[in-house]
Image (cartoon, grey):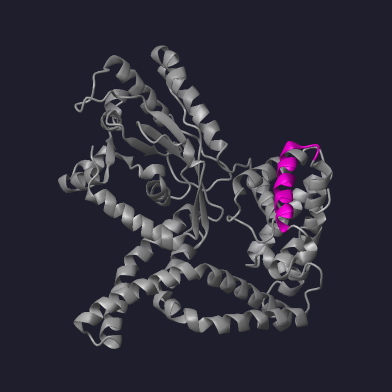
Amino acid sequence: MPFGIGHEIVCLISRSALWSFFADIKLQDEHNVPNEGPLIVAATHHNMIVDPAILSVTFPEQRRLHYWAKDSMFKNSYAAKFFDNCGVVPVDRKTKNNAQLYAATYRVMRLGESIAVFPEGTSHTLPRLGTFKDGTSFAALEYAKLLEEDPRPNPDGSLPRRANIVPVGIVYPEKSKYRSVAIVKYGTPIDVEPYMATYREEPKKAAKQLTADITSAIEALTVNAPDWESRDAAEMARWVLFPGENGSMRDYISVTQSLINAVNDLSQTDQDISLLKQSLRSYKLELDALALKDVHIAKYNEKDITAASTTIELLRRTLASLIDLPLFLPGLVGHLPLYIAGYYAGKFEIYEEVRAQNKIVLSLFLVPFIYVLAFIWGWLTLFGGTFFGFFVALATLGVFVWYHVTSIDERYESFKDLVGRWRLFDAVVLGRGMWRRKERILQLKKLRDVNVAGVRRMIKTYKSKNDDVHAVWLAIRSRVRQFGDPAKLHGRKKKLAKQFEWAFEG
């Protein structure tokens, strides 16, 4: 099944949408993906249509991916032609016969092409992977069996090959947040040959075994917790251990998973860790309730939150934003409808796994109108509607869009920080709002101090006794070594190094 222009258009739109929504999409261990032969790419599915979009535009070696869709979607001739053009493969869900169920899939794989599937079946927001279905396993095993029964060459003379299964973990530290990060981690391909003897005798048993192994492989590529308490506690432990880092961490997956394992395991035998786990969760929930980030409280880690310090910090941040505003204002005004639409698209969606999709789709709908209007205004107003001005206006619009997207990250982080400073100012200085917010913030600062001390104590106590804690300690020490001599540091790097002082020795 060849790919047509429809596939290229969809990928182009997806690439543009992802570039504007995510600050970065990090690929890890992409060398694990074979550069030839048919593949079944089994990926996590936590973010609706964002998942296939990311896979399609970032898959190594620019290999194209087919996707499954129920065959009823192909009943309309125009829809069928479009889906075929995009490389979508129909699946007959009404039959119990695997050879018939995946017939179109097998035709694709005989040509050496690849299918991307989501074994969890549906998108979700859980602290760990969902239950994997056996469809991926049956497709791979039945195809291998068919090749044994029918090994004849393809029409082009090439010999068909079995399809290896490539496990993929798509991890989103903040999956519904604008300008967040996505991490795509590839695992070692799984060969179906070891399962074939069992499959010939007991197909269901072999499929279950393969599904279990696919699940284990993808678990190793992702972040999984037994419950939200463990997940939230580990996330906050990571925030206080690695200030200034979140999804930007090169070792986000391994560090976060090690912290989940450590907090969950040690809390079973150590009462202090059990209390720390509860305290970290409480800290996160209170931050969320006050719409604050750890960085806002961390600023006051060594001083009281006073009216003077809060006001000074707010004025400093506000002045810096005002100085930078003239350079960023045109792009901000031009894209303001997108930001407003994205805000409300996320605000009124109750399912987190749908929010990013809604924001992206709504923005894609609005972008043509905004950019066409901006182009017409620029061409007629700035360049007099001339023939030469048409091309200058077009180039100007391209630069305008590029500059805004590439420069927005620092400004957006500054804006979020400024909003947090205003909330602190409102609570501490103006004393407005219900639920005694000033007292809650002061208590939050004390709770953070307790958590920071507790997490550091856990690391120092168990760094030589627990493998997961030891892995986190090595990650911390790698940061410390990068600072070099603390006496020679200046500015922001010196402030950051100060928060790692506790780990400089040992």
**Which residues, given as a range, are shown in magenta?**
464-483
- Look at 52% across and 27% down and name the residue there: 213
Instruction: Give x and y (percent) for residue 336.
Output: 43, 75
- Look at 40% across and 31% down and name the residue there: 136
Q: Main secondary structure of the magenta part?
A: helix
Instruction: Give x and y (percent) for residue 149.
Output: 29, 15
- Look at 80% across and 64% down and name the residue there: 487
**Quadrant of the image occupied by residue 337:** bottom left
Question: Does residue 451 sit above or below 465 in this rendering?
Answer: below
Residue 258 lies left or right of residue 200; in this view the side is right
The quadrant of the picture occupied by the N terminus is top left
Residue 301 lies left or right of residue 188; in this view the side is right
Is residue 162 highlighted in magenta? no
Instruction: Give x and y (percent) for residue 328.
Output: 48, 78
Considering depth in this image, is 220 or 139 the residue closer to the camera?
220
- Look at 58% across and 56% down and name the residue there: 248
Residue 14 in view of the camera: yes
